[in-house]
Image: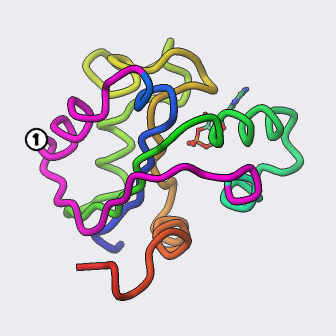
Amino acid sequence: STNKTFTMIKPDAVANGHTGAILDHIIKGGFKIIAMKYLALSKETAGKFYEVHKERPFYGELVDFMSSGPIVAAILEKDNAVEDFRKLIGATDPAKADKGTIRNLYAESIGANAIHGSDSDENAKIEGDFYFSALEKF
Ligand code: CMP
């Protein structure tokens, strides 16, 4: 397994002022930030990023939400990054997220769930490459 994962701090968490606390949580969790940007997604870009979910009933809602305000996108490095980061952020549904996880602390709902984490090494690479060129990665 590689030692990198990809994350987005979602529009709800940015709008609610949690960006700094979440970045602090990530860094204190032992992750090193390899590349990071603060940006707004167009509907088209959000739709492309989440294309794998195109047939899901929540796809339209997901794309609207992810393009509703600025996000923070970042590539993170740590041993066992994908698995350890998913532990740090907690379950997709914040009601099911373990106490002290980022989603337990900052998420509002299954859609507005504060943060994204890649679910596999393969997707971590695909997702990181979606946002960052080779020149932008340390
Ligand atoms: P994420 O890990 O970014 O990947 C897909 C996202 O779809 C997921 O986080 C959730 O925020 C969102 N999602 C999953 N299930 C639902 C649902 N039932 N309703 C709305 N959004 C959902």
Front position in the image: 33 or 101: 33
In the image, is residue 11 part of the stretch drawn in magenta? no
Query: Can residue 52 be seen in this snapshot?
Result: no
Q: Is residue 40 above or below residue 98?
A: below
Q: In the orientation shown, which residue stands out farthest toward the bottom?
A: 135
Residue appearing at x 46%, y 69% in the figure: 128
Q: Where does residue 47 sit, x and y in percent of width and height? A: 75, 54
> Residue 134 occupies which quadrant of the picture?
bottom left
Q: Is residue 88 above or below residue 100?
A: below
Colouring chosen for the image of the structure: rainbow
What residue span does the magenta drawing correspond to? Answer: 16-45
Q: Where does residue 114 sit, x and y in percent of width and height? A: 45, 30
Front position in the image: 42 or 33: 42
Q: Is residue 7 above or below residue 109?
A: below
Quadrant field for ligand 1: top right
Mark 1 residue type? Lys
Image quarter where the N terminus lies is bottom left
Front position in the image: 45 or 49: 45
User: Disc 1, ligand 1: is the CB inside 8 Å?
Assistant: no
Q: Is residue 80 above or below residue 107?
A: below
Residue located beneath label 1 in the image: 28
Residue appearing at x 83%, y 38% in the figure: 60
**Left or right: 55 with respect to 40?**
right
